[in-house]
Structures are given as C-alpha cells and as structure tokens.
Amino acid sequence: MSFRAGGSVSLSNSHTPLSFALHAVRSLPVKGASAVTASRAGVLLVEDDLGIYRLSGSTATLWAGPELHTALADLEGITANETGDVVWALSEEHGTLVELRLGARGPRVVRTAVLERPGSTKNKGFEGLAWVAPRFSNTGRAALVAVHEHKPRRVCLCDLRTLVVTDDLKLPRAAKGLLDDLADVAVDPVSGLLLLLSEESRRIAVMQLDHAGLQLIQAFDLPLEDGERPEGLAFLSASRLAVVTEGPARLITFRVTRRAAGRV
C-alpha cells in the first residue's frame, strides 16, 4: 500500500484506523538526518556524528554536541516528553542514553545510562527512541521505547525512573516479513499505538502493545525517491507525522486523522 502525493492511506480494521495524507516535503540544511523530534526549543534533528541540531527556517544550528557529552557524537535516536522541556538522546554503538533538560542557557545533561543490548553476540545497535506517556504505560508511569536495528530486531521498553530496560520484545512473525530492520519508533499521542520505521524496507508498521506483546495492525510504504533512506520518525503534533531521510536529507510530513480511539 503506497502513498500518493496529496493522497492518503486508511488502516481499515477494528483497532484504530488511521489515515495519512502527504502534507509537505522540504530539503534539510544538514548532510543527513537520522532522527527528529519536537521540543520546546523547536524541531530538533540528529546528524549522526555531529550531534543535535535545531531547525529554524532554512538553517540548522548545533544545539547539543559532543562537547556537552561524548555520546552525542554517536546518536541515532531522539525524543522529547509531552511538554517538550526534557529531551532524551540515544547512541547507537554503546546504547548510552542521555537525558537533557532545557533551560534559559540551553540544554544541560542531568542523567545518563547505558541500555542493555539485546542478543548474545556482537550486533547492530540501537536506532530509535520515543517517549511513552503515563496514560499509555502499563505501569501508569512515563516510559521510553527504544528499537534495536537488527540481529536481533527488538523493541525495548525502558523505565523512566531507573533508566533500566524492563521489556525486550520480539516482532511478531507477520511484522518480520515487512520490516527488514528497525530504524526508529514513534508513539501515537492519541491512541498510544507504536509506529515502527524500517530503513531497508522503506515502510512503517503500526503496532499494538498489550499483555500478549506486539501485534501488527497495518503497514504502509513511504513515497520516497530512488536511493532515499528513511531514518527518523516522530509526531510533531497529534495531527502531523514527520519522517526524515538521508540521500538526500529531507523532512516529509503527513497529516494524521483517526476514526476511533485505541490504547496500548
């Protein structure tokens, strides 16, 4: 199922049907973008080895780099809480999670932790990160969800108070055939559904998380140019979903509408 410019895709099932309509495509003033989030500081982009950049019009300026913390030179994931005043960044190779708080003088590091890597052998690292609101958490507390790219492809839940991985979830068989890797994750702020992005498959899968684990709801292909690689995914607002790409670096946004409400 593919997007068309100005068109939409509906998820026609009984869980939480969503519709996505292509809204805008713009070039980004960075070499490549591997993650994106909305924050009180504005839209933040990750440029792999350089750090976190703040997007402002047609320019991007370094917002938090390796001089603030060395892990910010090896990033693949970024997310912010609902109010946008706390940002978490995740490094790929070592799984270092950096918590940043926004202040009058800019971001400051308040906590760090190293997330336990899934699997028992040398493997690819963490690629994406998203904040989970308390209303969607099975503990009633805010949490983080991180995705591990490959070998194995995993969705990991992290307790926000302890920064410890509490759940290491495998993809269901149906999703494994659709997602060759995991590049990022986003949480629908209305329903709590998880959206998993695959760079290799250039596809997003919508997943439900419940006591039985992950369940595939629907999947859709992204309207990308040849050679373009989707690496980052985030809701910029309840009605706007963003995808950032490399080769070239672009920001693609979709309008999101919903026909029913659901919960994780």
Image (cartoon, grey):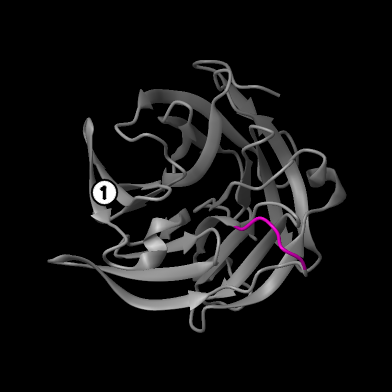
Callout 1: helix, strand or loop? Answer: strand
User: In the rendered structure, which segment of residues is drawn in magenta?
Assistant: 121-125
Q: Is residue 77 above or below residue 240?
A: below
Q: Quadrant of residue 217?
A: top right
* Residue sitting nearer the eye, 102 or 59: 59
Query: Within 10 angstroms of label 1, few (less than 14), some, or many (20 or more) residues?
Result: some
Who's the residue at 48% across and 32% down the image? 246
Residue 10 appears left or right of 174: left
Q: Quadrant of residue 7?
A: top right
Residue 26 visible within the image:
yes
* Residue sitting nearer the eye, 92 or 88: 92
Residue 202 appears left or right of 22: right
Does the magenta portion include 140?
Answer: no
Does the magenta portion include 122?
Answer: yes
Who's the residue at 71% across and 36% down the image? 219
Reading the image, the residue beneath label 1 is 42
Q: Three-letter amino acid code at disc 1?
A: Gly
Who's the residue at 61% across and 47% down the image? 195
Who's the residue at 62% across and 52% down the image? 194
Residue 236 percent location from the top left of the image? 39, 45
Q: Is residue 220 above or below residue 16?
A: above
Residue occupying the far top of the picture: 5
